[in-house]
Image (cartoon, rainbow, N blue to C red):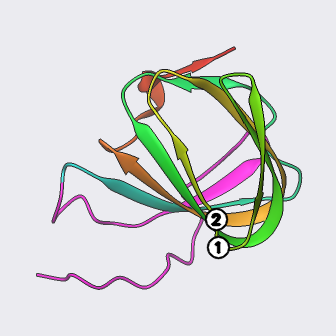
């Protein structure tokens, strides 16, 4: 069983201003997902993730999140927690590690 993973080289998805690379961890856990998110401008929409908590660790860059109508700046080294059920978006030029609990599936997301 493999427990240590290199960062994925290929993009798994690209949408609304972001690109992502999913770590292939579903064979060892069905409770958590992990992706590297990259953006030059930010998320182009506001979403509500109905089932997942999103936890972003800022690897590079800066910007701001708007979570439940509250704006918060972020920079390298910050941890941003978006609880399931809250509307959010983010703007900036950055690279982030995204941990989701439970794993993310597109049908759980609502675009506002």
- Tag 2–tag 1 contact (CB < 8 Å): yes
Q: In 3D space, how far apart are the residues under numbered discs 2 and 1 (Cα atoms)? A: 4 Å
Instruction: Give how far across and how far down residue 77 sits, in percent.
Output: 64, 73
Q: Is residue 112 magenta?
A: no
The residue that disc 1 covers is 77
Viewer-proximal residue among 87 and 95: 87
* Image point (29%, 41%), residue name: 102
Quick one: SS at disc 1? Answer: loop
Of 21 and 77, which appears nearest the observer?
A: 77
In the displayed structure image, the side of residue 48 where residue 67 appears, left or right:
right
Question: Where does residue 75 sit, x and y in percent of width and height?
Answer: 77, 66
Q: Determine the main secondary structure of the stretch shown in magenta.
A: loop
Residue 18 part of the magenta segment: yes
What residue lies at 49% left-to-right and 80% top-to-bottom?
7
Q: Residue 59 location, x and y as percent? A: 66, 74
Residue drawn at x 28%, y 65% as measured from the top left: 25
The residue range painted magenta reads 1-29
Residue 11 occupies which quadrant of the picture? bottom right
């Amino acid at each position: 069983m493999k427990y240590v993973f290199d960062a994925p080289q290929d993009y798994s998805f690209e949408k609304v201003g972001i690109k992502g690379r999913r770590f292939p961890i579903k064979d060892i856990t069905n409770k958590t997902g992990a992706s590297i998110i990259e953006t030059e401008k930010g998320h182009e929409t506001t979403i509500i993730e109905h089932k997942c908590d999103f936890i972003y660790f800022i690897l590079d860059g800066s910007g701001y999140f708007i979570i439940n109508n509250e704006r918060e700046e972020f920079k390298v080294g910050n941890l941003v927690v978006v609880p399931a059920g809250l509307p959010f978006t983010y703007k900036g030029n950055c690279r982030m590690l995204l941990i989701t609990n439970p794993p993310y599936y597109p049908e759980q997301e609502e675009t506002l």
